[in-house]
Image (cartoon, rainbow, N blue to C red):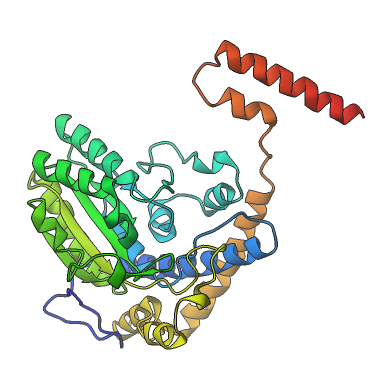
Amino acid sequence: MLRILDVDGNVNRELEPEIDDSTLLRMYRNMSLTRIADDKAVKLQRQGRLGAYPPSKGQEASQTGPAAAMDKEDWTVWAFRELGNLLYRGIPLSTLYLYWMGNEEGSKFPDGMRITPSAVPVGSQVPHAVGIAYAAKVRKERSAVVCYFGDGATSEGEFHEGMNFAGVLRTPNVFICQNNQWAISVPRTRQTASRTIAQKALAYGFPGILVDGNDALAMFAATKEALDRARNGEGPTLIESYTYRMGDHTTSDDATRYRLEKEIAEWALKDPLKRFRRYIEERGIWNEVKEREMQDGIASFVEAEVKKAEGHPRPTLEDVFRYTYAEMTDDLKEQMEALSKAAHGRSEE
């Protein structure tokens, strides 16, 4: 397994990637923001102010490391548990909260951002990512496509179809499997008999690598190398990010029914934020004063983003009809008028 930072934050100097101080600080802030924003989202859901939500606590390095290695022209094709990657790449937190509040305008990202909407059906985004990458190849762009999915997705047909096409067509894809050890309540050991998920890439004719997903430096280095391969026309790479979901699968789940406290305690010792903080402290660019200032700043920022999302206009009944197609069909026009009359009638009762 590729590991550059050990659990105590000690760095392997031979493998340490060249990252400037400002980028390292940005990575740490993003991981911290992701942790706090994620915790806030769970609380909002419990208060009835947000819909079902998939916590990402513990997977911040798995998402931030690759984001720091990507260029603006690259694509992120995600599933639903990639908050850290999206924040680092510039999606406003208020927009993401809006999405989880059930407002479809939360899927409308700022112009120029190469990020697809969330794909909740497990594994369904893999063929999409390959299609986008193939288009980039045909257009002779130097962009690559980073596609996230979980360990459960590797048992889906779309995973095989996407991997097969990517291998045959040599598409510029970087597949990142966030192996967080559990697909809802199904443990990794019941997901596949393969010793690793990374080795599945060999069957499709391209490299796979097992990486410590709680090590932001290792995830950065592995993704950077894979992106370089993709841009140089050398085809796709599969990265297995070996990490752990510290929270429930979603706010509709109760992981205490199928996981042991001992297992969670063991993974807590591998916390990606703690080891990265020790690394930048050892590097001489971080201290307790900066930590407190950052934590206070993020807390205020998150509250302001919640306020912005909750203050956004709610969707109307007509929006469902107006934005399903570029132009409304006659049937939809009739249905919208009928529903509007019915709703208007109820309001007068």
- Picture quarter with the N terminus: bottom left
Instruction: Tell me: residue 226, above or below residue 244.
Output: above
Q: Position of residue 200 (x, y in %)?
A: 15, 59
Residue 20, visible in the rendered structure: no
Instruction: Tell me: residue 172, above or below residue 182.
Output: above
Instruction: Tell me: residue 164, above or below residue 222.
Output: above
Which residue is depicted at the point 66% across and 26% down? Answer: 318
Q: Position of residue 26 (x, y in %)?
A: 38, 65
Left or right: 337 in relation to 155: right
- Picture quarter with the C terminus: top right
Which residue is depicted at the point 17% across and 82% down? Answer: 12
Which residue is depicted at the point 19% across and 65% down? Answer: 221
Which residue is depicted at the point 15% across and 81% down? Answer: 13
- In which image quadrant can residue 18 be found? bottom left
Counting labels gives 0
The residue furthest right is: 349
Closer to us: 67 or 163:
163
Left or right: 81 in relation to 156: right
- In which image quadrant can residue 85 be found? bottom left
Instruction: Tell me: residue 248, above or below residue 339.
Output: below
Q: Position of residue 335 (x, y in %)?
A: 66, 19
Residue 246, visible in the rendered structure: yes
Q: Position of residue 240 (x, y in %)?
A: 23, 64
